Amino acid sequence: MDDLLKDFIIECNEFITAVDQDMVAIEKRPDDKEGLNRIFRAVHSIKGACGVFGLHRLEAVAHAGEDVLSRMRDGSLVIAPVTVGSVLRAIDVIKEILAGIEATQKEPQGDDSAMLAQLRELVAIADGGRAPAAAAAASVNVPAETAPAAAGKHGPALADQSLRVTVEILDRLMNQVGELVLTRNQLSQLALGDEGSRYGASIQSLGRITSELQEAVMKTRMQPIGNSWAKLPRLVRDAAAATGKNVELTMVGSDTEIDRQILQELQDPLTHCVRNAIDHGIEKPDARASAGKPEQGRLQLSARQEGGQIIVEVRDDGAGVNFEAVRSKAVERGLVSDSDAQRLGEPELIDLLFAPGFSTAAKVTELSGRGVGMDVVRSNVQKLGGSVELTSQRGRGSTLRIRIPLTLAIVPALVVGFSGQAFAIPQVAVTELVRVSEQNAHLVEDVHGARVLRLRGDLLPLVELGEVLGLSAERKSAGEGFFVVVTQVGESQIGLIVHSVFDTQEIVVKPVGKLVRGVGAYVGTTILGDGRVIMILDAAGIAQRSGALAQLDASMRKRREAEAAQSVHRSSTKLTQLLLFRAGNGAPKAIPLAHVARLEEFASSKIEQADGRALVQYRGSLLPLVRAGEEIADGACQVIVSSDGERSMGLWVGKILDIVETELRLESGARGAGILGGAVVDGRATEVVDTRHYLDLAFGEGALPGEATRELRRVA
């Protein structure tokens, strides 16, 4: 059965039980106006909800009973056994209908015409004033004693399965369960290392019972997130009308359950997000039509559970963030200089939208322009231990994603140590744990002053707790070893450097004290099993306080700028790739890479002599070898294979050094055989080899002066 229908039946049964008692009471005390008002409100509430579920029979009976009660309230019908009996008869029919709905999940058929006619006759007599009220009531043919409802074999079981409890009692119960969890943790800590303790079985049983009790109490605090969405359709309608827009709202995942406390704290952020999407995101109908979009904008609110988190998304198909407007407003407000603003990327510009008092609205309206909104969303969500992310695509819309924990009361956490102190990190924020030691110390790097860990190809900014929390501790090198707790902060990740990792525990979250509330690095406190009070770390707050993400972004921006400048230089300069090698004790030599076919290495024992030439059997033929310098000692020899398309030869060199890309400028002057000229390559004087000369030597032909130089310049 649908949850809403279940709640309706339970509520109706509660109303009917109260009406039975109040009707009997006012029959004895006709002057009890408050009792009569309670009866009228109960029947009115039943009638009002019937239309939602399409319960037309129930609605007709409740409506007729409400009319009679209305005349009893205004005094046109006296409160007498016969009038009370008519109302009780209607109540009995309501009971029958509710029992049928509960049993079959649909409204039962029945003939209520006689009972309805009696109720309408009472109303007509009261309205027409045809007779005194008491006599008129007595003239109506209503049985003095109403027959009991046909309560069937099913009965109002749902009413017996639920109980209304005040929130205060649930909160007190939750606090006591929290204390019980702490006691369990303390006993478990005491039992560690004492396998033969006679209390071991009892402690184990206590732990199991505590976990089951904790789970049951947690469920009492959970409510569908749709409860906080009830006001949004009206909000969307009013906001769309105020801005002259046409907006369709869809809601997905409204049955996703979340802690009641978080649900209450989430209402304001959601309201801001929805209003912002309508005012700043979705365009007016004419603008959408000119952009080739439907005139009606779409706004989707969705919720889903992912691990230990609830993901709430507000998605629109509007114009997206106007990044140039954000850039201009940031300069106008003095948040950044004009030159710095031009270098800001989309992530940095989106981050500016969450700055306090920031707004791109041209004028102040009822919906926007006051600079209060997105900063409130982020701060409120972060207080809940969550995070906010905004992604946008120009012309296609934006998505605001809110990540929040399922509950704030009792959460699993990783207990870590730094500089002799212990801290707890909620597991919902922990992605993975990395051990950095001497074996993988090379993964820790400095990128323009930002300390990072190269994790599977990505750069993870590192933060030492001591630097953020003011703890006196020397920075450990990677060789000494430390742990990196990888935590999720919005769409990004940071690595928290800790000295030790202890274990995971279910901790009871207590609020932080006033003295440390403004630090921004803690979301609460807790008590460990050994009685120690420790702080619960806020990964998002630590990232913001340390500036690690911003520092890495700045470092990466510098790197991108340098790469861009280098790219511009390359595009405007003719560069040549050269293979550097040594041959003898002179200056290093170079060959244009375009003249190199392959690099090979042969054992000197494989080199043969024939026709006065050094040869080596290579790929089914004989490859002539030419020495690039003085005689080379026996052993393995490195060979540069070069070809002009028709002929191939191997240049026998001492050692191949590197491949570089440079602007090749040949210096004029005296040069030896096989040398085109000198050049500065990689900061050193280098001789550039004429490969055609060595090809001619290999095949006993004379070199043509000038051709090789022209060929080299053509390649370059």
Image (cartoon, grey):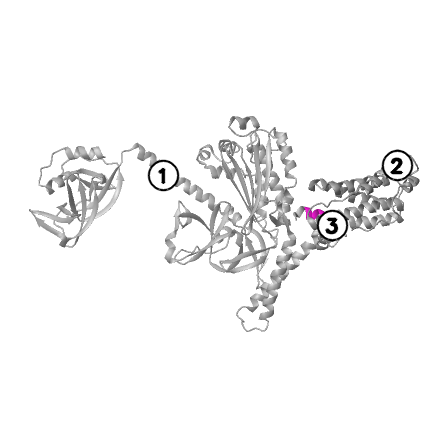
* Image x and y of residue 626, in percent: 13, 45
Local crowd size for mark 3, using a 10 Å CA cut-off: few (<14), some (14–19), many (≥20): many
Q: Earlier in the sequence, mark 1 or mark 2?
A: 2
- The residue that mark 3 highlights is 99
Residue 375: image quadrant is top right
The range drawn in magenta is: 5-13
Disc ID at residue 125: 2
Q: How many marks?
A: 3
Query: 117 or 269: which is nearer to us?
Result: 117
Main SS class of the magenta portion in the image? helix
- The residue that mark 1 highlights is 563
Q: Earlier in the sequence, mark 3 or mark 2?
A: 3
Q: Residue at x 11, y 36 (%)?
A: 703
Q: Earlier in the sequence, mark 1 or mark 3?
A: 3
**Disc 1 versus disc 2: nearer the observer:** 2
Mark 3–mark 2 Cα distance, whole angstroms, equals 32 Å
Query: 530 or 691: which is nearer to us?
Result: 691
* Image x and y of residue 588, in percent: 20, 44
Instruction: Left or right? Give the position of 492 relative to 643.
Output: right
